[in-house]
Image: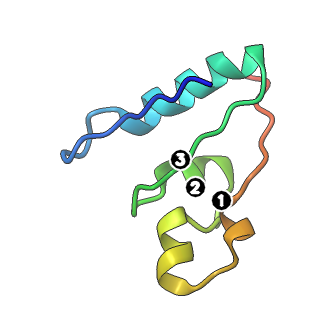
């Protein structure tokens, strides 16, 4: 199982855009998992508006399943 990580301390370098684009491409070949560990939760907001980010589960004590969104994207 290949694992790809997109990271940078600097904002605005297209981490989220790249992750969503790659995930949509890879999802054509099978199940794909995106983990949004960014405190800004940009990918989470894109996939599930109002959703809980992974960092929110740790910090706020939310249920871990609150940070999971199953999304089928047909238009990418």
Question: Would residue 76 be visible to someone looking at this image?
Answer: no
- Write down the residue under mark 1: 49
Q: Could you give the CA–CA distance between mark 3 and mark 2, rounded to whole angstroms?
A: 5 Å
Residue 76 location, x and y as percent? 67, 21
Answer with the quarter of the image where residue 38 lies.
Answer: bottom left
- Write down the residue under mark 2: 45
- Write down the residue under mark 3: 43
Residue 4: give its label: none
Residue 66 location, x and y as percent? 71, 69
Residue 36 location, x and y as percent? 51, 51
**What residue lies at 58% left-to-right and 85% top-to-bottom?**
61
Residue 52 location, x and y as percent? 61, 68
Kindly check if marks 1 and 2 are in contact, taking CB atoms under 8 A apart as contact: yes
Figure check: 43 above or below 2: below
Kindly check if marks 3 and 2 are in contact, taking CB atoms under 8 A apart as contact: yes
Question: Would residue 25 be visible to someone looking at this image?
Answer: yes
Q: Regarding mark 2 in the picture, which secondary structure is present there?
A: helix
């Amino acid at each position: 199982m290949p694992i790809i990580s997109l990271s940078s301390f600097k904002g605005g370098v297209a981490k989220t855009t790249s992750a969503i684009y790659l995930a949509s491409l890879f999802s054509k070949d099978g199940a794909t998992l995106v983990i949004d560990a960014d405190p800004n939760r940009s990918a989470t907001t894109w996939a599930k508006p109002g959703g809980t980010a992974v960092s929110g589960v740790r910090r706020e004590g939310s249920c871990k399943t609150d940070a999971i969104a199953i999304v089928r994207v047909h238009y990418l």
